Amino acid sequence: MVKFITVLFLIPFLFLTIEKVEAKVLPQAKSGSKTNIRNLTPNAVTVSPRLRGDKKALNVYYSNLQNASSVSYLLTYKTASQDEGAMGTLNSKTSNTSVELLFGTCSKNVCRYHTGIHDAKLDVSYTTKTGKKYIKRYRIKI
């Protein structure tokens, strides 16, 4: 017990004796030539998810679809009672460059929206015409 009390009193004094801490900056982190990410992947499919004004849907806008052979999306989220989601694919040959994903379900023009939505995530995966596969992940804050 005496050793324990002694250690408790010595710990604060150790922090008082430290005078200076140094950190080194790695060469690749120093300012200099900056790499533009857009120049690395000029043919990449661009994805822009935006919450609808009433926050009951997610609008996802796509561009550069002509560079992809296939595009698919998966929206997942949790409600108070269960996990929910929506998924689909885009045809790169059509002019449809946006998708509206509801946080709820619709049947015969009657929509029921989910409440208490949290942990929303959007995964967009696509394959370029050269065969490379990519996935983009987004966390949606509601």
Image: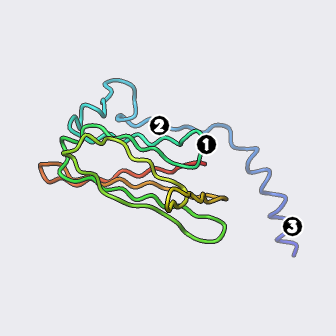
* Above or below: residue 51 compared with residue 4: above
Mark 1 Cα-neighbour bin, 10 Å: few <14, some 14–19, many ≥20: few
Q: Quadrant of the N terminus?
A: bottom right
Q: Nearer the viewer, residue 73 or 17?
A: 73
* Secondary structure at numbered mark 1: loop
User: Taking 8 as reference, is 44 above or below it?
Assistant: above
Determine which residue is flagged by label 1: 54
- Circle nearer the viewer, 1 or 3: 1
User: Reading the chain from its start, which is encountered first: label 1 or label 2?
Assistant: 2
The answer to whether 29 appears left or right of 110 in the picture is: left
Q: Are marks 3 and 2 in contact (CB under 8 Å)?
A: no
Q: Please provide percent x and percent y for residue 47.
A: 36, 42
Disc 3 vs disc 2: which is toward the camera?
Answer: 2
Q: Which mark is residue 62?
A: none
> 121 or 105: nearer the eye?
105
Q: Earlier in the sequence, mark 3 or mark 2?
A: 3
Q: Nearer the viewer, residue 22 or 27?
A: 27
Total numbered circles: 3
Rate crowding at label 2 as few (under 14), some (14 to 19) or many (20 or more) other CA atoms within 10 Å.
Answer: few
Element at label 3: helix
Measuring from the top left, give residue 3's x and y in whole percent.
82, 71
Which of the numbered marks, if any, corresponds to residue 5?
3
- The answer to which quarter of the image holds residue 21 is top right
